[in-house]
Image (cartoon, helix red, strand yellow):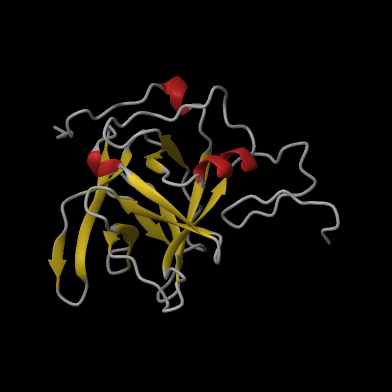
């Protein structure tokens, strides 16, 4: 039986339908990279040439303590709309697999040579263990997802090729060593001349090459 945080919610299907499917690619400057794949027990990391990435939904949240959904009035239908919402300051999200389970960061332990690390698994509701604070990195057009439960970031355990939560690292120049490129499975808006997508959408302006 799943143990839920007080106030945990299970969004309705009509709410979830308003958010697009995404693929999540790991940018790891010190290891192997790869993409996020769903699995029955734990989210897995797979190399990009081994299998196709799995579909996930990044569910936008309006609050952390109440776990309420930031539900748009209509379905998000283009990339620029989705990334505009995702990039809002102070954004919190939950990450849902195609099986209807939410990525969940459990209590951390301190491991030799690694530091604090947390197992990542699934839960069927959104509570404190399933909420991530989003940070967008302009220098790399990528994202980090920090668990609000213990402040560790969603990363990879390449020993077991699973997702985990660990302390975030940078390269000494403020650029993250472990971040995610998000590919939204949405069309571009008809009003956009071009969408350059590397984790975020950019509307082309007059004079662009």
Q: Left or right: 4 with respect to 66? A: left
User: Is 164 above or below relative to 39?
Assistant: below
Q: Residue at x 23, y 48 (%)?
A: 149
Give the image quarter of residue 131: top left
Q: Residue at x 36, y 48 (%)?
A: 133
Give the image quarter of residue 30: bottom left
In front: 114, or 151?
151
Give the image quarter of residue 10: top left
User: Is 113 above or below relative to 107?
Assistant: below
Q: Residue at x 78, y 37 (%)?
A: 191
Residue 8 on image: x %, y % = 24, 30
Q: In this orientation, does residue 41 appear?
A: no
Q: Residue furthest right?
A: 207
Residue 168 on image: x %, y % = 33, 65
The tally of labels here is 0
Residue 60 on image: x %, y % = 43, 36
In front: 62, or 116?
62
Q: In this orientation, does residue 200 appear?
A: yes
Residue 11 on image: x %, y % = 36, 25
User: Is 200 above or below relative to 192?
Assistant: below
Q: Left or right: 128 with respect to 144? A: left
In front: 56, or 74?
74
Q: Residue at x 32, y 39 (%)?
A: 102
Question: Where the C terminus falls, by quadrant?
Answer: bottom right
């Amino acid at each position: 039986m799943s143990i839920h945080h007080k106030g945990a919610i299970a969004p309705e299907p009509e709410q979830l339908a308003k958010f697009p499917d995404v693929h999540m690619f790991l940018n790891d400057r010190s290891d192997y990279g790869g993409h996020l794949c769903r699995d029955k027990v734990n989210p897995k990391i797979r190399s990009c040439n081994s299998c196709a990435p799995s579909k996930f939904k990044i569910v936008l949240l309006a609050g952390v303590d109440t776990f309420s959904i930031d539900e748009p009035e209509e379905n998000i239908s283009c990339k620029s709309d989705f990334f505009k919402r995702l990039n809002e300051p102070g954004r919190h999200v939950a990450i849902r697999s195609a099986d209807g389970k939410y990525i969940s960061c459990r209590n951390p332990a301190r491991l030799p040579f690694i530091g604090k690390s947390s197992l990542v698994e699934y839960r069927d509701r959104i509570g404190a263990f399933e909420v991530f604070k989003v940070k967008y990195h302009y220098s790399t057009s990528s994202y980090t997802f920090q668990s609000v439960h213990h402040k560790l970031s969603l990363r990879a355990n390449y020993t077991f090729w699973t997702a985990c939560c660990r302390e975030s690292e940078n390269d000494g120049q403020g650029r993250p060593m472990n971040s995610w490129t998000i590919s939204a499975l949405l069309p571009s808006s008809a009003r956009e001349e071009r969408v350059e997508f590397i984790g975020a959408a950019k509307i082309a302006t007059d004079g662009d090459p």
